Image (tube, coloured by chain):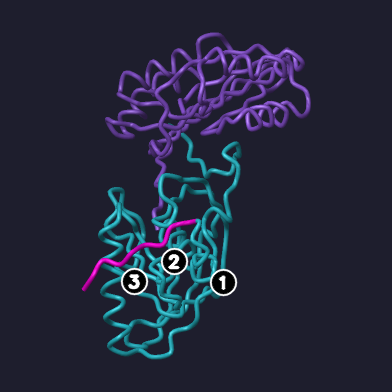
Amino acid sequence: MNWFMLTLVGEDQPAIVAKLTTTLFEGGCNLGEAAMARLGGNFSIMLMVQHSGSVESLETLIAPVAQALGLHLHADRIEGHLHRHLIPDVRVTVYGADRAGIVAQVTSALSSVGFNILDLQSDVGGSDAKPVYIMTLEGQAHDGIEAVEAALGDIAREGIAVDVQSIETLIG
Amino acid sequence: MAVLEILTYPDTQLKQESVAVEAFDTALQNFIADLEETRLAGPGAVGIAAPQVGRFQRIVIVDVSKMKRPVANHGHLILVNPEITSWEGYAVGREGCLSVPDYTGNVIRAERIHLIAFDPTGERREYAMEGFEARAIQHEMDHLDGLLFLDRLVSKRNDLFRRKVFK
């Protein structure tokens, strides 16, 4: 059984996940890790899928249901491995009046101090007239949390609210 | 002394309730020594509970005194028949478990607790704890009631994290 990354994107409607995963299950596939997000009213999902055939046979299996649901479909053969989780040690929250460039600025600053992003969630709240950008990042700060705080200092001084917290994971 | 085998989920024994210790004897001391050796052999565990090694008695060990970023603590604690007598506040924190390898998740715990327990010689002790140490105690004591942190997971997308303002 090979691992594939299956990505489906389209207009959101109820029961998409159930229909997709039932088709995969009945087609002999096994699922690994998965993430679904609803972005701007669009449904999107990434699924690690274990399948005994090729990209083509996986696409053939899922295409009819994807088409019926109006979803774009993409499959890639991947070197998949389970049990490879990394534990984040720093959480960064950013919010402010929305403008182009916040993500690029924040993530470039983080990248400059060796911060490896493991999870990113962002939303635009507020209203059309006054949109508010909110982003939460979790990752590993290889140069330490102080370096992250220093790197984001300029952005904080520009009026974007930046909060940096250490994540102490309790193992017990 | 020996490193004991750690039960891992889905072993159903982890869901079983443990009974109170009645004899504070040499057998208890010996078991506690083994339990501590097992904790130290694991990957950076700040605590361990007896049922995690298949002994269904109300015994936990917690030690948060050696954290990289220091936290308030009462040193190395061996708690027999512990009972939490009061809870206050709540906080979300990330937890993992020797009995649930390769998964960590967010869990809500009381921020401050009062605790009564016996030490390994049968002496009654009382503690007031907060923060990470209080979280560790609550995590370990859950094992005594057959609960795992998986039973208390909260959504990743929540906004309950305590914030301090970036200056």
Regarding residue A48, the answer to whether it shows in the image is no
User: Which callout, 2 or 3, points to the residue nearer the camera?
Assistant: 3
Q: Is residue A64 left or right of residue B18?
A: right
**In this structure image, what is the colour of chain B?**
cyan
Q: Quadrant of the C terminus of chain A?
A: bottom left
Q: Which numbered disc, 1 or 3, marks the residue that appears first in the sequence?
A: 3
Classify residue A107 by image quadrant.
top left
Residue receiving disc 3:
B77
Residue in the image at 54% along x and 43% along y: B161
Q: Is residue B5 magenta?
A: yes
Q: Which chain is purple?
A: A
Using the image, tell me which numbered label, if any, was put on residue A26: none
Looking at this view, is B82 or B98 the one in front? B98
Residue receiving disc 1:
B86
| Marks 1 and 2 share the same chain | yes
Q: Which numbered disc, 2 or 3, marks the residue that appears first in the sequence?
A: 3
Which type of secondary structure does the marked residue at label 3 adopt? strand
Looking at this view, is B78 or B40 the one in front? B40
Q: Dot 1, how many residues are within 10 Å of its Cα: few (below 14), some (14-19), or many (20+)?
A: few
Q: Dot 2, how many residues are within 10 Å of its Cα: few (below 14), some (14-19), or many (20+)?
A: some
Classify residue B74 by image quadrant.
bottom left
Using the image, tell me which numbered label, if any, was put on residue B129: 2
Question: Residue A52: x and y, percent?
Answer: 50, 25
Which type of secondary structure does the marked residue at label 1 adopt? strand
Regarding residue B11, the answer to whether it shows in the image is yes
Q: Which residues are magenta?
A: B1-9
